[in-house]
Image (cartoon, rainbow, N blue to C red):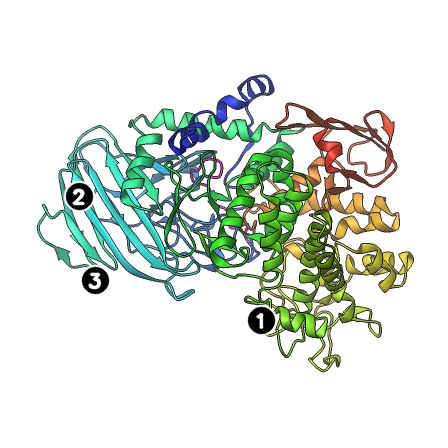
Amino acid sequence: MTHTNLMKTLYLTLSLSLSALCAAAGDFTKYVDPFIGTGAIDGGLSGNNYPGATVPFGMVQLSPDTHEAPDWYNASGYDHNDNRIYGFSHTRLSGTGASDLIDILVMPTVSDRNVSSFSHDDEKAVPGYYQVRLADEGIRAELTATPHTGIHRYTYPAGTPRNLWLDLDHSANKGSWGRRIINAQIRQTAPDRLEGYRVITGWAKLRKIYFVIEFSEPIDSMTLFDGDGRKYGSADATLINGRSPRALVSFGEASRPVVAKVSLSAVSGANARQNMEAEAKTFDFESYAAEADRMWDAQLGKIEAKGEPEKLTTFYTALYHMMIQPNVFSDVNGEWVTPDYSVAKLPDGENQYTTFSLWDTYRAAHPLYTIIEPGLTRDFVNSMLRHYDYYGYLPVWQLWGQDNYCMIGNHAIPVVADALFKDIPGIDKTHAWEAIRNSSTQSHPNSPFSVWERHGYMPENVQTQSVSITLEMAFDDWCAARVAEMLGDTVSAERFDRRALFYKNLHNPANNFFAPKDDKGDWIEPFDPLRYGANGGQPFTEGNAWQYYWYVPHDVECLIALTGGPKEFERKLDTFFTLTDSSGEKNDNISGLIGQYAHGNEPSHHVAYLYNYVNKPEKTRRLVSHIMSDLYNNKYNGYAGNDDCGEMSAWYVFGALGFYPVNPASGRYDLGLPLFDECVIHLPSGKEFKITADRKTAGGTNVRKILLNGSRHRPLTISHRDITEGGTLHFEID
């Protein structure tokens, strides 16, 4: 199969693959509200989601920018608390705590205005479609998308000029990450076509974005500008180069709307044209919006839940958010930009993906992909392995094909390892093991392995964020050891097993916390378990010692022993969920608090399930139920923290299903409490795994009995194989 045909298959037949299912199961997209998580109340932390148009795992995320220069607290470009729109750009991040992308902005106007007020009463969003009325000039803007193309339709008031801005200067805040535009071009190449590119550096280094825009009618006139507002040439100018070019394009007065197709490529303008030819030949806006809806309905229908509409809206919006990314990075012809900025071509049948927020998504999103999207899991893993081939180690936080080194550890390792353990087809195990081994031994930012092996921990005076890095790297090493063991490399397995226990070297029995040491082996004092760290300068990363105490997912039994046994472990958990004391200023990522538990950030996400390990599952169930009901909702402030490329959403999806991967590379899922009375996972094999609940009272959390395929199930876990072989998991709940 050629890559052109592959992308046509991705775009045109995703909706057909489950058409019979979706026809029987109903319309899933009606339960999605893209406005959930787009704002915060009273200074809280937003989900940083956006309401605009995209298709599952697409390159284009076409949405309004309500900030002139999006930054940390409006990272996706949109904030529900705003009332002004600066235009519609084609790329962005969903749910992250930092902003980047925000490329190729288009803004309609009847004059030369480049900003407009708007009201949420005049806004609508469903999967793959967004609409808003720009109040200042009465223009209706509509957006939809294909994988590589954004489709705009602008309806102007009768008798007014139909103009629009194309702005290549607009970006995320140029005061962050050293962001600057290196070069850009706008060129008219046909009566109805503009082409160009932008080279920009920022959080992702040196990004190239090529675009082609085709309009539904010829351009009447165009005026070009540079960054200081000067005009270039006359109204018939057709070309501008610079660092901040803009174009004011006019189509004259007429009653018909203007439709614009904007196709992107990271490789070349020729590839952008080819992407458009493959995905967006016509100007039939309704057909693109309908196809986007069908694609989303097929994706969302892979999990079929039955329940109250309000809960279904929260559930399916969470599932929607975790299917926005990772994003396809290759073009329809299979070409993609490698980490060394050369162009490579993929094997037939594969796509290259980017946007790997791995410190977040390895915990729940990637394990969930292995259940409902094993084919995409193959592509995600192979994309990481190709990154390794050029970079020398697996990605840490990959964006637009480059590593921005954000966060700590190298959590591509558990993602690749988990795919191998689950025997996802199409992954070269020898290649994967080489990548894991070298990524665990070749030092890179925040991972000085010579220090790690010399001391058996990270000394804070040598490597800051030392306690968090020690705990997280120990888990990565456990994953490496299991892969080595699976492939018969006993020497490496012994090495990494030894390193996987390094976390013990920072357990201080005097205070029963993981605490920092210096390079001489002395405890660093004073030590305050309530004191927060951020991303450097403190021993803990975006948290404190309480929140990181529980991060030994590969060795919980040993952690229980270090704590003083099951009863002491339970008491410490009880204190964790009730202690409201604080010390100093909280880290900005700390939100969604239950005692010291911070659901708004990922290190806490598995902790509610740890009561299972001391045979107190009733406490796990009560907490999981409380988190789902109190820390998520179906309004614009529906997340307790940044969604982080779908990780916060993935936690909710797992919680609603009734299980969660405490160790995300173990192939086991810890049982909690299902949200719905019936939920069916439609597996790619054609089998089904059904989760049912018989509740005697609404809101009950006391599980009297669990049945797996009709037989009493006493363990507090189920296996990946239990799910993929199909069957029924039944809860009887008082």
Residue topped by disc 3: 228
- Tell me the crowding category of disc 1: few under 14, some 14 to 19, or many 20 or more residues within 10 angstroms, Cα based: some
Magenta span: 46-57
**Residue for badge 2:** 188
Q: Quadrant of the C terminus?
A: top right
255 with respect to 286 (left or right)? left
The residue pinned by badge 1 equals 536
Gap in Å between the C-alphas at discs 3 and 2?
22 Å
User: Is the residue marked by circle 3 packed among few (<14), some (14-19), or many (20+) residues within 10 Å?
Assistant: few
Q: Earlier in the sequence, mark 3 or mark 2?
A: 2
- Residue 252, by quadrant, is top left
The N terminus - image quarter: top left
- Of pointers 3 and 1, the one earlier in the residue sequence: 3
| Most common secondary structure along the magenta stretch | loop
Q: Is residue 459 above or below residue 175?
A: below
Dot placed on the residue nearer the N-terminal end, 1 or 2: 2
Q: Position of residue 105 (x, y in %)?
A: 31, 48
Which disc, if any, is residue 450?
none
Query: In the image, is 56 to the left or to the right of 244?
Result: right
Q: Position of residue 482 (x, y in %)?
A: 72, 51
